[in-house]
Amino acid sequence: MKFPSVPGRTTDGRRVHLPVDFEGEQTLVVLSFHQRQQSLVDSWRGFANRLREEYDHFGYYELFVSGGNSGMLPPTAMGGLSPSNARRRLDDNTVFVPVDKNAFQRRLGIVGEQTIYAFLVEEDEVVRQAAGVLTSSTAEALESLLSEYESAQNRWSEIGSDTAEESSGG
């Protein structure tokens, strides 16, 4: 399934369009719908930041999804926080996404806002998903996927350099 195309704003006010603006060949996207879910999001943050340091091809975003059926961003979309407070309490990779929540959830195949959701996105396609707090088995599986992807990319690079050497007579 394709990750839905949505506009958003970073905590510093920069406009982005997702998934086009995702950085990373593999990108972990953690969605939350309510400020009270921040502790669930935080369970993913430290692990995801460690993965970003370890894998050059990996990106991480926290999406705070707000809005009703109209898709309009309510005045308290950031949980009543001023932009300066939001920057201090949220990750630099947080993006506020003012959309029709119901339509967005349908496009991702999720039901309700009772928990958070994590999606691994490759080339705009959702390849894995999880719900709720990060568990050790989910963390191990994600790290394994990233490692396998990196190994495959390295093998392709080696094949490409071998082919280039052969064609140049080396």
Image: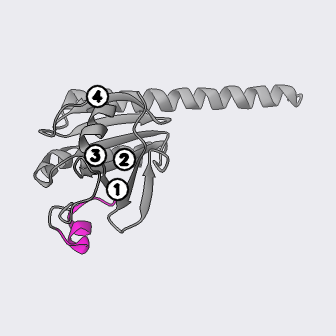
The residue pinned by badge 1 equals 93
* Horizontal and vertical percent position of residue 3: 40, 36
Give the vertical position of 132 relative to 10 (above or below).
above
Query: Pointer 3: what residue?
Result: 100
Which residue in the structure is indicated by mark 4?
109
Label 3 SS: loop
Above or below, 35 against 147 in this view is below
Cα gap from disc 1 to disc 4, whole angstroms: 24 Å
**Residue kind at label 4, given as amino acid type:** Gly
Q: Position of residue 10 (x, y in %)?
A: 36, 61
Q: Is residue 123 above or below residue 45?
A: above
Residue 49 visible in this rendered orientation of the protein: no
Sequence-first tag of 3 and 4: 3
**Residue 60, numbered circle:** 2
Mark 3 and mark 4: Cα distance apart in space: 14 Å
Please tell me whether residue 82 belongs to the stretch shown in magenta.
yes
Q: Secondary structure at mark 2?
A: strand
Q: Amino acid at mark 2?
A: Tyr
The amino acid type of the residue labelled 1 equals Asn
Label 4, label 2: how far apart the Cα atoms are: 21 Å
